[in-house]
Image: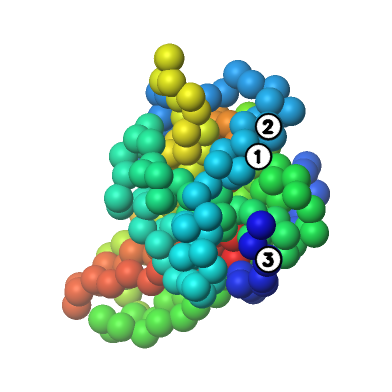
Amino acid sequence: MYQKTNKFQNEDIELLSDTEESKNDESIFIKVADNAITDLEEEEVKEIISDMYEEVDDEYIEMFEEMSGSEIKEKLDAFNDKYEVGEAFSEEDEALLLYAYEEYAAQENKTEDFLQVVYTTRKHTISNTKTKCGIKVGYSGSLSTYTTCSYGKYMTNVKVTKYSGTAKSMQWKTSHSAYGLIGTSGKSASLGLVYTGNTKSSKYTNTFSFDKTTKYSALAIVYHSTWGTLDVKTSSGEFNMNTKTYSSVE
């Protein structure tokens, strides 16, 4: 077995209790894989994931060991555009996902138990200000995620402030993708994109707050990514402000 190293760094993350969540629970756009596996017990999930990792080819492990944490995260985040919901990953991409999951587990929890790593609430603090197209706007707040053995959810708590100028519209959007177990009758389980979706605020012309939670069903979510976007339109033009992409392996 390879030597574990601490490749992934955590910034602006706060762990919360399982019961702390936003009051709203709806989404504008949701797409969940029809073949996402949702009917296994937690112990069965652990065994499946463990067996899958044990079967990863050593050549892949050696190749991933030569990559930096940022390089691995960049490749993982690219899966959002590379795969359709419900589509199984290639052998190499599945190996990379399992490797990153194990790497993170070793760093954060000093445990071989994969599922102990992701099953927690992670809160990411966000803040930014920008002046463009005759207006000065900013946002502050948090993006949070939580996964269990049978579902996941992502929470938005953000305030958008108009400091000066006139806006035709301002709208916040939080996007989320999750990778987990999928399966087809007669075939063994594999990893794939099990969920992609976003939740949007209404359109405003002045300062507003947006507080919302979105929940989805999926089993053994081994990786998820979340990011926010503020879209601004004025009479002089339009622009957007993006947060960084927060994942479960940083």
Whether tag 1 and tag 2 are in contact, CB under 8 A, the answer is yes
Residue of label 2 = 47
From where the camera sits, is residue 59 visible? yes
Q: Residues within 10 Å of mark 1 (few under 14, many from 20)?
A: some
Pick the front one: 2 or 99: 2
Residue at left offset 68%, top offset 32% = 47
Render colour scheme? rainbow
Q: Would residue 175 be found to the left or right of residue 21 on screen?
A: left
Q: Is residue 50 above or below residue 100?
A: above
Q: Would residue 99 be found to the left or right of residue 234 on screen?
A: right
Residue 130 image position (x, y, % from top left)? 40, 82
Q: Is residue 39 above or below residue 165?
A: above
Q: Residues within 10 Å of mark 2 (few under 14, many from 20)?
A: few
Q: Quadrant of the C terminus?
A: bottom right
Residue of label 1 = 50
Which quadrant of the view contains residue 31?
A: top left
